[in-house]
Amino acid sequence: TESGSRITFDIAFPSGTRLPVSQAQLLELAGPVLENAVRFPASKVHVSGGPRQLVIEDDGPGLGTAEREQVILR
């Protein structure tokens, strides 16, 4: 985001939610997605999930079709 802009984080998990990964694995998996989410939002990042599920969304412009195909190549 532009220098000085604010981002609101909305974090919603059911009580007692546990993901079947270690902290290091979670950081490796979710870290790049969270970095992207805070780089391009209009104003909000939403993190939610449940058993065996993690959802990270932002209200940014998103990717075009060609860009979507490119980012999954790795």
Image (cartoon, rainbow, N blue to C red):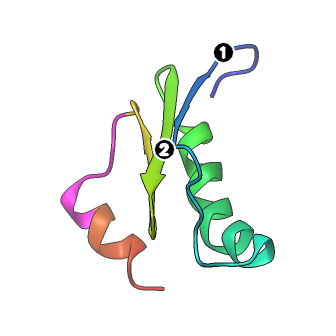
The amino acid type of the residue labelled 1 equals Arg
Residue indicated by mark 1: 6
Q: Of the two numbered discs 1 and 2 on the same chain, state the one appearing first in sequence.
A: 1
Quarter of the view holding residue 11: top right
Above or below residue 47? Residue 22 is: below
Q: Secondary structure at mark 2?
A: loop
Query: At 48% from the left edge and 86% from the top edge, which residue is drawn?
Result: 74
- Magenta range is 61-66
Residue 15 quadrant: top right
Q: Is residue 55 visible in this depiction of the protein?
A: no
Q: Amino acid at mark 2?
A: Pro
**Main SS of residues in magenta:** loop
Camera-nearest residue between 25 and 71: 25
List the residue tagged with mark 2.
14
- Name the residue rendered at 60%, 40% in the picture: 39
Residue 64 in view here = yes
Q: Is residue 11 above or below residue 3?
A: below
The residue sitting at the right extreme is 24
Total number of numbered labels? 2
Front residue of 26 and 60:
26
**Position of 15 compared to 50: left or right?**
right
Label 1 and label 2: CA atoms lie apart by 26 Å
